Image (cartoon, rainbow, N blue to C red):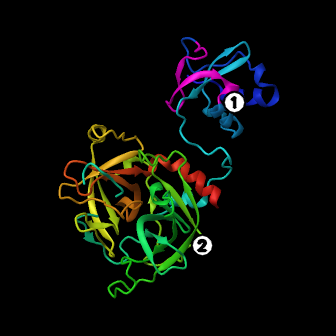
Amino acid sequence: MFCDTNLIILVLIFINIFTLSESFIYAYDDEDLIEGEKCLTKNNEPGQCIEFLKCNFANKLYRAKRSSEITVCSLVGRIPFVCCPTYPKISNFSKPIKKSSFKFQKALCKNTKPIDRIENHVINGDKAKVAEFPFQVALGYGWRRSKKLEFNCGGSLIADDIVLTAAHCVNKKGAQPFMVRMGRTCLNLDDKHDRSTVQDIEIEKIRIHPKYSSKSKQNDIAIIKLVKPFIPSESIATICLSTSDADAPEDFTITGFGLTSIDFNERSDWLLRGTLSEYPFEKCKRKFENKGVRIADSQFCGFSDNGVDTCQGDSGGPVFYERKSEFYLHGITSYGFGCGSSYYPAVYTKVNSFLNWIEVEMTALE
C-alpha cells in the first residue's frame, strides 16, 4: 500500500518538510525500509531509499505538483526517506502540463471515427498507390541554397506541424535535415505518374529524446516542429498514435523510400510498402544479446519470411496498422543487422512507450 500523498502535499506546503506527520501509510506494510535499502517505486522501477532532500527526482516531482508519484520508505525522526529510482524514466519537469496539448489529444484519435554491421534501416517491397499513405514524409538534407537535396530518412505526420521520426535521423553531426517533403508518393517531381501537389516545409525545431543513445539506439525517437502547418489535401494527412499493445495486430505495414538493393546501393524514388510480423520479444532479445546488443521494453522486433525489411533511408519512417478506416502509428523504423536478413529481425521504436514524452514536447511546442 502506498502513502497518503495528499498529506505529503499539505504538510510540505503549510508546515515544513521536517515536520511531516508520523501517521503516514508507507509503501511497505510489514516494516519500514531504512536508508540505503533497495525498493520499488510506484512505477515498479528499482531504487534506493534515501533522504527526500537528497533525491533530485522526488524533488522535481514535488515541484511539478506530482507528489502522488513519490513513494515513501519511512520516517526517521521527522525526516522522510523516499524510494529514489536508480534509472528514472524520463519526464519533463520544466513546465508542468496544466492543459494537455489539443494536437496531442487529436493525435490519439479518440474523437475521430552485411550481417555483423548495425544498419540504420523496404527491401522486397511493393509500390504504394498514389496518396495511399498521406502521413508519410521524407526528411531533406543538404544546404538551403544548394540544388543538391538528399532524402535520407522518413517520418510521420502526427499533427499539422509535427513530425515523428527517429533520433538518429536528426542527431548526425553536419547532416541535419532542414526541410520535410510531403504530399508525394514519388520524390521525383518530374514523374508523371504522381501528380500530387508537393509541399516542402522547413524545420523550425528538433527535440531529441534526452535518453537517446547513439550506441545502443534505445529511445530512438525525435519530434520535428515545422515552421508552418501543412495545407490538408488528399495526399497529406496525419496518422493516429497507437496507445496500447493490446490494440495492435500481429502484422504491420512498413513504408519508406530507402534502399531496394543492399548489393547495388539502389534507392527508390517511389514509396514502397511491405508487411512485417512482430517477432517474439524474448527470442529477439536472445538473438541480439549474442551480438552484445540489448533490446529494451520500449522496442519491438519485426520479421518477414519473404525477405521484406526496412533498410537505409527508411529510418524514422512508420510502422503502422489500420483499424476502422484509421491508420495507427505503432513503431518507428530504427535499425537492424543488415537488410532482409534471414536470421536477425529489424528493431523498431515502440511509439506507445513514449506517449508521455510526446505529449510534454507537443505541449511545449504549441
Q: Which residue is mark 2?
A: 228
Asked if the magenta segment contains residue 46, the reply would be yes
Residue 298: where, in percent of width, then height?
Answer: 42, 44
Q: Amino acid at mark 2?
A: Lys
Q: Of tags 2 and 1, which is closer to the observer?
A: 2
Q: Classify mark 2: residues with Cα within 10 Å, few (<14), some (14-19) or many (20+).
A: few
Q: Amino acid at mark 1?
A: Asn
Residue interval drawn in magenta:
32-55
Vertical placement of 364 versus 219: above or below? Answer: below
Residue 299: where, in percent of width, then height?
Answer: 39, 46
Tell me: 132 left or right of 84. left
Whichever of labels 2 and 1 marks the residue nearer the N terminus, that label is: 1
Asked if the magenta segment contains residue 182, the reply would be no
Disc assigned to residue 152: none
* Figure disc tally: 2
In three-dimensional space, the C-alpha distance between marks 2 and 1, rounded to whole angstroms, equals 42 Å
Q: Which residue is mark 1?
A: 6
In front here: 134 or 249? 134
Q: Classify mark 1: residues with Cα within 10 Å, few (<14), some (14-19) or many (20+).
A: few
Q: Residue 234 is drawn in which quadrant?
A: bottom left
Residue 124: where, in percent of width, then height?
Answer: 22, 65
Quarter of the figure that contains the N terminus: top right
Residue 99: where, in percent of width, then height?
Answer: 66, 53
Quarter of the figure that contains the C terminus: bottom right
Tell me: 302 left or right of 103. left
In front here: 225 or 173? 173
Tell me: 21 left or right of 295. right
Farthest residue toward the right? 14
Kindly state the secondary structure of the residue where label 1 is placed: helix
Q: Residue at coordinates 58% horizontally, 17% vertically from top-left? A: 36
Q: Residue 328 is drawn in which quadrant?
A: bottom left
